[in-house]
Image (spheres, rainbow, N blue to C red):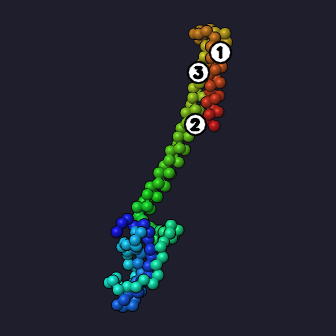
Amino acid sequence: MSKPTRIKLEVDRDGWTSNLQVNLAQVDDNDSGWGYRLAGPKYNGSSRNLLSRTLDERDAQEIRDALNAVFPDERITQLTDERDRARRWAVGLEQENAELTRRLAEARAEVLREVANDWTAHCPDHSNDADEVWMECPCYWTGELRRAANEAEQAAR
C-alpha cells in the first residue's frame, strides 16, 4: 500500500452472519488500505460492500467538531487555557506599563518644574534675595524646562 490519499466510510454485510459492518478506511489510489471497524462483527473476508462514501474536507471538519464537542483533546484544552492565561498576563502587563509610564511622566514634569522654580529663585535679574544669587540669568532655560514639563504632563494624560 502506498500513502493513503482519502478516507472512506463504508457499510458492508458480513457473509457469515448477514450482520452489517461499519468502518472508516484509509485508502490509497488503488483502494488499498486499512480501516477501523465502528460496528458489526469482525471482518473475516466474506463481507460484501453495500455503501461506500469518500469523505471530503467538510465531512472531516464536521466529524472533528462533533468529536471535539464530546471528547475534547486535553492537550488542546490545556493549550487554550495557557493561551488565555498568557493573554490575561499580557493585558495586565500592558496596563501596568501604561500606568508606570504615566507616573514617570508626571514625576518628570514635577522635577522639571521644581528645577525651573529653583533656578528662577536664584536668578540675579529676578531674585529679591541677593545672597541667594549664584548664576547668570537662567530665565531662557527655565522657560525651556517649563515647556518640557508641560509636554511631559501632556504625555501623562
Q: Picture quarter containing residue 127?
A: top right
Q: Picture quarter containing residue 105?
A: top right
In depth, the one of 47 and 19 nearer the eye is: 47
Q: How far apart are marks 1 and 3 (CA)?
A: 12 Å
Which amino acid lies under the numbered mark 3 shown in the image of this protein?
A: Val
Which one is in front in this view, the residue at disc 3 or the one at disc 2? 2
Is residue 157 in sight in this rendering?
yes
Whichever of labels 1 and 3 marks the residue nearer the N terminus, that label is: 3
Which amino acid lies under the numbered mark 2 shown in the image of this protein?
A: Arg
Q: In this view, does 143 lie above or below 87?
A: above
Is residue 65 in sight in this rendering?
no
| Residue 62 % position (x, y) | 51, 70
> Is 70 displayed left or right of 122 in the figure?
left
Residue corresponding to mark 1 = 139
Residue corresponding to mark 3 = 115
| Residue 115 % position (x, y) | 58, 21
Residue corresponding to mark 2 = 102
